[in-house]
Amino acid sequence: MSDKDLKIVSVETTILDVPLIRPHKFATTTAEAQPILLVAITTAGGVTGYGEGVVPGGPWWGGESVETMKAIVDRYIAPFITGRGVDDITGIMVDLERIVANARFAKAAVDVALHDVWARSLDVPVHTLLGGAFRTGVDVRWALGAAPLEEIVEEVTHKMEQRLNFAFKLKMGALDPVVDTDRVVKVVEAFDGKVGFSIDVNARWDRFTALRHVPELVDGGVELIEQPTPADQLDVLAEINRRVSAPVMADESVQTPHDAYEVAKRGAADVVALKTTKCGGLQRSKQVVAVAKAAGLRCHGATSIEGPIGTAASVHFACAEPGIDYGSELFGPQLFAVELLKTPLDYSDGQVHLPQGPGLGVELDMDVVKHLARD
């Protein structure tokens, strides 16, 4: 294989709208379908790799959407990287910082596609480019919808009986805090300590509300508190972290290596929610994990409700990165009503397992992709 074969000859983007098995409720919105920006990078040697641009529930979370990502990739990134070698990932991603500020979700799609196409060109799995896998799967926590208690109990019981998931997350922040807290405590109590539950407020509570209700949630048996207060209020998050015995996880507060440094310096969290999407891809994610690990923080393999491409990339990352040491919630494809792969990812025994084969180890069903593609 020559250097010429590794040259990028095309970067193509397609927006998909993938229906979900049930509505997925966030603090400010409810998703019934997940939009995905599929990025395909093809080399002169005829090899194509894929990446996903995905945000959790729309632009409310990080300011990006599939529409903005497509515009940035098509107009600014694609012309800039065409002609470059896919083996120059570090150089490309560094140079992109001069072309486009922020836009980490869009950059993550390009970063993953570059890893996939380079690994496929070498006939090796993506984790090889990351140092090699030291495990074959990671634990997966399942996110529950805002259903009545009886339905949630039924869903949790089913997941456990099928050995798909053994830990669960409840979204909060959309309801009145008193009602929301009471709802969660009742769910936890229904399982009498036999199931692990975390909560995620998506940064929607103010200091007063969080200081009132987070201790009540912990006393009620919640084992992990995710981002109860706004991302930039690190001193408030640190105050909450000091007041409760359960670990606090920072999500919205950590999107860059410097964010991880600030959280660690202030003692604002015990765990970092590491999303390869919000960090800007696999390269930048390694930097975030390195800072967190050096500071003694644990890292959780979090999700932006990625499809199978983004999820597979995060699984490769988690299986090659010892710093991901607090499980994951890489359940995205389990929430999809339509299968995008020829062979689905393996979810069993409470884990998602590392795909085998070159690149990301997954193959898209292009008939399904075409059917879901937005006109």
Image (spheres, rainbow, N blue to C red):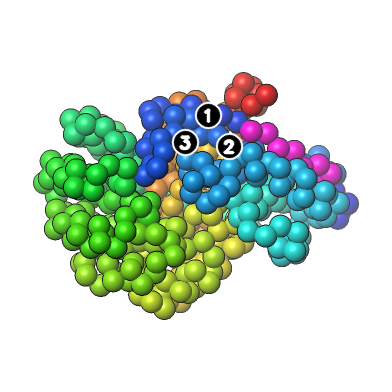
Instruction: Give the amino acid at mark 1.
Output: Val
Q: Chief secondary structure of the magenta span?
A: strand
Judge whether residue 316 can be spotted in this image: no
x%, y% of residue 116? 66, 48
Dots 1, 3 in contact, CB < 8 A: no
Residue 250, x across and y down, in percent: 39, 62
Judging from the image, what secondary structure is the residue with disc 1 in? strand
Distance from disc 3 to disc 2, alpha carbons, whole Å, reads 12 Å
Q: Quadrant of residue 49?
A: top right
Q: Secondary structure at mark 2?
A: strand
**What is the span of residues highlighted in magenta in the rendered image?**
8-15
Q: Give the x, y percent position of residue 316.
A: 53, 52
Q: Quadrant of the C terminus?
A: top right
- The kind of residue on which mark 2 rests is Ile
Q: Where 17 falls versus 277 (above or below)?
A: above
Please say if the residues under marks 2 and 1 sit with CB atoms less than 8 Å apart. Answer: yes
Please tell me which residue is depicted at 53% across the width and 72% down the height of the picture. Answer: 258
Find residue 36 and name its label.
Answer: 2
Of pointers 1 and 3, the one earlier in the residue sequence:
1
Q: Earlier in the sequence, mark 2 or mark 1?
A: 1
Which mark, residue 18? 1
Residue 50 in the magenta stretch? The answer is no
Mark 3: secondary structure: helix
Whether residue 182 sits left or right of residue 301 in the image: it is left
Residue indicated by mark 3: 333
- Going by the numbered disc 3, the residue's amino acid type is Pro
